Amino acid sequence: MQRYIKKVKFQNKKVFIVIKYVKMKVNITENQYNKLKLIEDENPYYNDQKINGENLNVLWAAIKKKQQELFQETFNDLDELTRSKAEIYGEEKLDVPRVIALAGNAKVPQNVLMINITSALACPSYYLGICTIKNGACYAQRGENQYPNSRNRNLQNDLMNTELLRKYQKGNKKPMRDYFSLVEMYIQIGNAAAKNIYTQTIDSLRRRGKVITPEVEQTVKDISEEPKITDIRLNEAGDFPCQLSVDLWSKFAKKVGAKYGIKVHAYTARNLDFSNRPENFSVLPSHEGINIGEEPNRRFHAVNDNLYDSLQGGDQVDNNFQPILGEHNGKFFYKCPCGEGEPHCDLCRVCFNRNKTGKPYTIFVRYHGLTAANGLKHLFKKDEIDKSIKLAIQNGWASPSEIKSYNSQKNQKRLNTMSDKIDNMRAKAQKPLGKRKKAKI
């Protein structure tokens, strides 16, 4: 079992354990950890490869094979919209990505499967002019600018989902069904690894003739259940590309909710129809005018330092670490600490859950995107993305109000200004660095 543990961190009488392979993070009490460590000390027998009768490598190989087959089928006959994106993203993005989903990140617990349908650098809401975050202040764009692996993975997912949706619209539904079966395989590998922690430890004790008390068995069982995938988070970067994407994810959310007890939550700046989503599918919009079928409504809003600091309250929690609503001039809000400290998304869950307060509220977060323009060179200029946006509009992937927003003089001026900045950044990036002066000793 110890070989599965990569890192152990003690904090506030809780123990955070990072599990190898599936990158799951569990959190248990210090008492539970001491009991588990006692079991490990008495059991030198561990097998890296065995996972409850299945081999982790075999499971990963099955996922990779499924991804390969999906891509071969998906990109066999490209639609014009996908081809226009491939021209600006780069033909290498048509290759199979290493993964299509990740288990958590620095802020989100690793029992949350994170899936991006589109890329932040090619976010439809950004170019349509309906996103509330302007001028390179997007946190997701910063991540893709800074990390090539993240950028390439999301652009590959963008291309794949674009083509899957176009094929589905034309009546070829098999590739999209294969995609969702692939997502389900990511859920299963997390659950298999979690189950193994219990099974392997108990089996090892029995082989060594140890007495397994009900207390020890329950402790190991409780710990082993923690890493299971409990949530799917959509649109950490990007947004829903169209209404069809919302409808398909609503169906999948209903399936995984019934089968695994998983909740699905997503962010959006688009005023699409979310009325058919199941109870376990929550949506957090960035506009007050977006109707997500909940009364009262809520929204997520990034603001500058002056506004964030001027709000008093909204960042307090009760004894169960549940956030307490703040109020200012009759309006209710929360202040998310994201970007200014270590958030506890796994305990808070305000963004994850539906609005049960009975009041409309806004979740304010401090801007923590590109405060400097040195990463803008990876954004797409207006003339590069224009063809793809217009083809998406022709395919019915934008509402009349979104089309109006895209064609507005204000949005076109913004895109042209950003294009000039991107050109400048790209030119600076190509200039050779000058010779460094030798330091005086």
Image: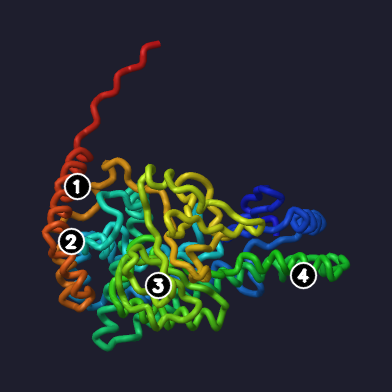
Q: Pointer 3: residues within 10 angstroms few (<14), some, or many (20+)? A: many
Q: Which residue is mark 1?
A: 422
User: Can you say whether 294 is above or below 369 in the image?
Assistant: below
Q: Quadrant of the N terminus?
A: bottom right
Q: Which residue is mark 2?
A: 385
Q: Pointer 2: residues within 10 angstroms few (<14), some, or many (20+)? A: some
Judge left or right: residue 424 versus residue 24: left
Tell whether label 4 touches label 3 (CB within 8 Å).
Answer: no
Tell whether label 3 touches label 1 (CB within 8 Å).
Answer: no
- Circle 1: element type: helix
Mark 2 / mark 4, whichever is N-terminal: 4
Q: Pointer 4: residues within 10 angstroms few (<14), some, or many (20+)? A: few
User: Can you say whether 116 is above or below 30 in the image?
Assistant: below
Disc 3 versus disc 4: distance between alpha carbons? 34 Å
Give the label on residue 203, or none: 4
The amino acid type of the residue labelled 3 equals: Gln
Q: Which residue is mark 3?
A: 67
